[in-house]
Image (cartoon, rainbow, N blue to C red):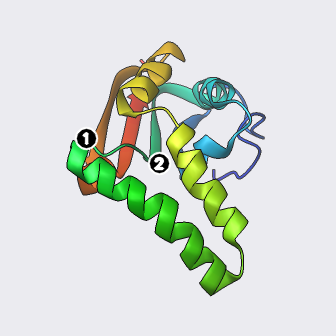
């Protein structure tokens, strides 16, 4: 079954889903902890939680370069290409507010998942987080 819905109130019965996949969306929920609890609710034993999200580069030089690019160029590009600076400013600010990889992994664990971990991509600019219902 595929379902699309509010991450805080999924239209899915409890303990029926094999997988819960979200990409570049959990940071935009009203309550990340609530979205994680809802993901845990709908997954059956052995179910997998997968979340691809922007994250924090690990190396300080890359982090400084990424921050400079994000805060200076992304909003300007959004203004020029989409005539919408505000949405692209929100994008980079929401990325900055999102928990880093270790903290988000801890939040997944706190929501009741086991086998929690993550894989960094592009030096940590994005990360794929996972947890299993054990």
Tell how many labels. Answer: 2
Q: Name the residue under label 2.
A: 53
Mark 2 residue crowding within 10 angstroms, few (<14) / some (14–19) / many (20+): many
C-alpha separation, residue under disc 2 versus residue under disc 1: 15 Å
Which residue occupies 54% across, 18% down?
111
Give the SS element for disc 1: loop
Would you say residue 133 is visible in this rendering? Answer: no
Pick whichever, 111 or 124, lies toward us. 124
The quarter of the picture where residue 65 lies is bottom left
Q: Can residue 76 be seen in this view?
A: yes
Category of crowding for the residue at label 1, using alpha-carbon neighbours closer than 10 angstroms: few (below 14), some (14–19), many (at least 20): some
Q: In the image, what residue occupies the spot 71% across and 81% down?
A: 83
Which numbered disc, 2 or 1, marks the residue closer to the eye? Answer: 1
Percent across and percent down for residue 15 are: 62, 26
Q: Disc number at residue 58? A: 1
- Residue at left offset 37%, top offset 45%: 128
Q: Please determine whether, in this image, residue 116 is positioned above or below residue 79.
A: above
For the C terminus, give its image quadrant.
top left
Q: Does 60 appear above or below 36?
A: below
Q: Position of residue 38 (x, y in %)?
A: 67, 28
**Residue 113, located in which quarter of the rendered image?**
top left
Q: Which of marks 2 and 1 is nearer the N terminus?
A: 2
Residue 30's place in the image compared with 34, above or below, is below
| Residue contact at pointers 2 and 1, CB within 8 angstroms | no
Q: Look at the numbered disc 2 and give the secondary structure of its residue.
A: strand
Identify which residue, 81 or 134, lies in the foreground.
Answer: 81
């Amino acid at each position: 079954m595929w379902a699309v819905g509010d991450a805080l109130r999924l239209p899915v019965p409890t303990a029926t889903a094999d997988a819960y996949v979200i990409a570049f969306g959990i940071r935009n929920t009203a309550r990340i902890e609530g979205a994680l609890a809802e993901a845990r609710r709908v997954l059956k034993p052995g179910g997998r939680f997968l979340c691809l999200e922007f994250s924090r580069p690990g190396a300080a030089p890359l982090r400084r370069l990424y921050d400079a690019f994000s805060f200076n160029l992304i909003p300007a590009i959004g203004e020029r290409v989409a005539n919408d600076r505000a949405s692209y400013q929100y994008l980079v600010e929401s990325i900055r507010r999102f928990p880093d990889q270790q903290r988000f992994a801890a939040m997944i664990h706190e929501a009741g998942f086991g086998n929690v971990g993550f894989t960094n991509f592009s030096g940590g600019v994005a990360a794929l987080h996972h947890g299993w219902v054990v």
